[in-house]
Protein backbone atom coordinates (compact mmCIF):
# COMPACT_ATOMS: atom_id res chain seq x y z
CA UNK A 1 0.00 0.00 0.00
CA UNK A 2 1.33 3.43 -0.93
CA UNK A 3 1.89 5.97 1.79
CA UNK A 4 0.54 9.52 1.52
CA UNK A 5 4.06 10.78 0.70
CA UNK A 6 4.35 8.25 -2.16
CA UNK A 7 0.98 9.36 -3.54
CA UNK A 8 2.06 13.02 -3.50
CA UNK A 9 5.37 12.15 -5.19
CA UNK A 10 3.57 10.12 -7.84
CA UNK A 11 1.09 12.90 -8.56
CA UNK A 12 3.80 15.58 -8.69
CA UNK A 13 6.10 13.47 -10.88
CA UNK A 14 3.35 12.94 -13.42
CA UNK A 15 2.39 16.64 -13.37
CA UNK A 16 6.01 17.75 -13.91
CA UNK A 17 6.57 15.43 -16.88
CA UNK A 18 3.24 16.32 -18.48
CA UNK A 19 3.98 20.03 -18.03
CA UNK A 20 7.38 19.49 -19.67
CA UNK A 21 5.90 17.68 -22.69
CA UNK A 22 3.06 20.20 -23.07
CA UNK A 23 5.55 23.07 -22.95
CA UNK A 24 7.69 21.45 -25.66
CA UNK A 25 4.60 20.96 -27.83
CA UNK A 26 3.66 24.62 -27.34
CA UNK A 27 7.26 25.68 -28.02
CA UNK A 28 7.30 27.37 -24.62
CA UNK A 29 10.93 26.50 -24.01
CA UNK A 30 11.21 28.69 -20.90
CA UNK A 31 8.46 26.68 -19.20
CA UNK A 32 10.00 23.41 -20.39
CA UNK A 33 13.36 24.51 -18.97
CA UNK A 34 11.77 25.16 -15.57
CA UNK A 35 10.92 21.44 -15.30
CA UNK A 36 14.59 20.40 -15.63
CA UNK A 37 17.46 20.21 -13.14
CA UNK A 38 20.39 22.35 -14.30
CA UNK A 39 22.61 19.27 -14.53
CA UNK A 40 20.03 16.94 -16.08
CA UNK A 41 21.08 14.26 -18.52
CA UNK A 42 19.41 12.87 -21.62
CA UNK A 43 20.21 9.63 -23.46
CA UNK A 44 18.61 8.84 -26.77
CA UNK A 45 19.05 6.64 -29.79
CA UNK A 46 20.78 9.40 -31.75
CA UNK A 47 22.91 10.87 -28.96
CA UNK A 48 23.24 12.25 -25.47
CA UNK A 49 22.99 15.69 -23.93
CA UNK A 50 24.16 16.88 -20.54
CA UNK A 51 22.80 20.02 -18.95
CA UNK A 52 19.43 21.69 -19.24
CA UNK A 53 20.67 24.64 -21.31
CA UNK A 54 22.18 22.36 -23.98
CA UNK A 55 19.08 20.18 -24.09
CA UNK A 56 16.67 23.13 -24.42
CA UNK A 57 18.87 24.76 -27.06
CA UNK A 58 18.66 21.60 -29.16
CA UNK A 59 14.89 21.30 -28.64
CA UNK A 60 14.43 24.89 -29.85
CA UNK A 61 16.02 23.84 -33.14
CA UNK A 62 14.26 20.47 -33.49
CA UNK A 63 10.73 21.55 -32.38
CA UNK A 64 9.54 17.97 -31.89
CA UNK A 65 5.87 17.30 -31.24
CA UNK A 66 4.68 14.63 -28.81
CA UNK A 67 1.42 12.70 -28.81
CA UNK A 68 1.18 10.76 -25.53
CA UNK A 69 -0.39 7.33 -25.80
CA UNK A 70 0.13 5.95 -22.27
CA UNK A 71 1.60 7.09 -18.93
CA UNK A 72 3.06 4.86 -16.22
CA UNK A 73 4.12 6.34 -12.86
CA UNK A 74 6.14 4.81 -10.03
CA UNK A 75 6.96 7.37 -7.33
CA UNK A 76 9.63 9.65 -8.86
CA UNK A 77 9.80 7.82 -12.20
CA UNK A 78 7.47 8.34 -15.15
CA UNK A 79 7.37 6.31 -18.34
CA UNK A 80 5.60 7.59 -21.44
CA UNK A 81 4.68 5.81 -24.63
CA UNK A 82 4.28 8.50 -27.24
CA UNK A 83 4.45 9.24 -30.91
CA UNK A 84 7.08 11.84 -31.69
CA UNK A 85 6.94 13.79 -34.94
CA UNK A 86 10.53 13.88 -36.22
CA UNK A 87 11.50 15.03 -39.69
CA UNK A 88 7.95 14.41 -40.98
CA UNK A 89 7.96 10.90 -39.48
CA UNK A 90 5.62 9.86 -36.69
CA UNK A 91 7.86 7.63 -34.52
CA UNK A 92 6.51 5.42 -31.72
CA UNK A 93 8.84 6.03 -28.77
CA UNK A 94 9.22 5.35 -25.09
CA UNK A 95 10.61 7.88 -22.61
CA UNK A 96 11.70 7.03 -19.06
CA UNK A 97 11.91 10.13 -16.83
CA UNK A 98 13.55 10.18 -13.38
CA UNK A 99 12.76 13.08 -11.10
CA UNK A 100 14.55 14.54 -8.11
CA UNK A 101 13.15 17.39 -5.99
CA UNK A 102 10.17 17.62 -8.38
CA UNK A 103 12.32 18.33 -11.45
CA UNK A 104 13.49 16.03 -14.24
CA UNK A 105 16.98 14.84 -13.38
CA UNK A 106 17.45 12.38 -16.25
CA UNK A 107 15.58 10.65 -19.00
CA UNK A 108 16.09 8.16 -21.78
CA UNK A 109 14.14 7.82 -25.01
CA UNK A 110 14.15 4.72 -27.19
CA UNK A 111 12.68 4.24 -30.66
CA UNK A 112 13.41 2.56 -33.97
CA UNK A 113 15.49 5.14 -35.91
CA UNK A 114 15.25 3.43 -39.32
CA UNK A 115 12.59 5.82 -40.73
CA UNK A 116 15.00 8.70 -40.06
CA UNK A 117 17.91 7.01 -41.82
CA UNK A 118 16.33 6.48 -45.24
Image (tube, rainbow, N blue to C red):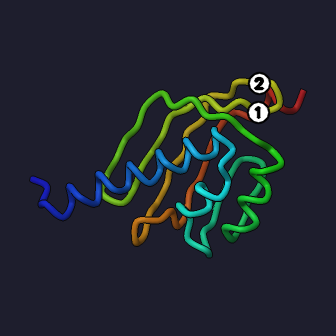
Q: Residue at x 37, y 41 (%)?
A: 72
* Residue beneath disc 2: 89
Q: Residue furthest right?
A: 118
Residue 48 placement (x, y as % from top left): 73, 60
* Residue beneath disc 1: 86
Decide which of 62, 95 is in the foreground and name it: 62
Quick one: label 1, few (<14), some, or many (20+) residues within 10 Å?
some
Instruction: Using residue 86 as the reference point, say whether residue 101 is left or right of it.
Output: left
Tell me if residue 95 comes above or below residue 84 in the rendering. Answer: below
Tell me if residue 96 comes above or below residue 91 in the rendering. Answer: below
Check the picture and name the quadrant holding the C terminus: top right
Decide which of 80, 22 is in the foreground and name it: 22
Q: Which mark is residue 2?
A: none
Does dot 2 land on a helix, a strand or a loop? strand
Badge 1 vs badge 2, beta-carbon distance below 8 Å: yes
Q: Residue at x 23, y 58 (%)?
A: 8
Residue 84 placement (x, y as % from top left): 66, 32
Amino acid sequence: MKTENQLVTTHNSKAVVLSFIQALNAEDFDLARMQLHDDMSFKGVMGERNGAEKYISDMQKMKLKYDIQKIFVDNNEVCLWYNIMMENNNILSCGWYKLEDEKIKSFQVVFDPRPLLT
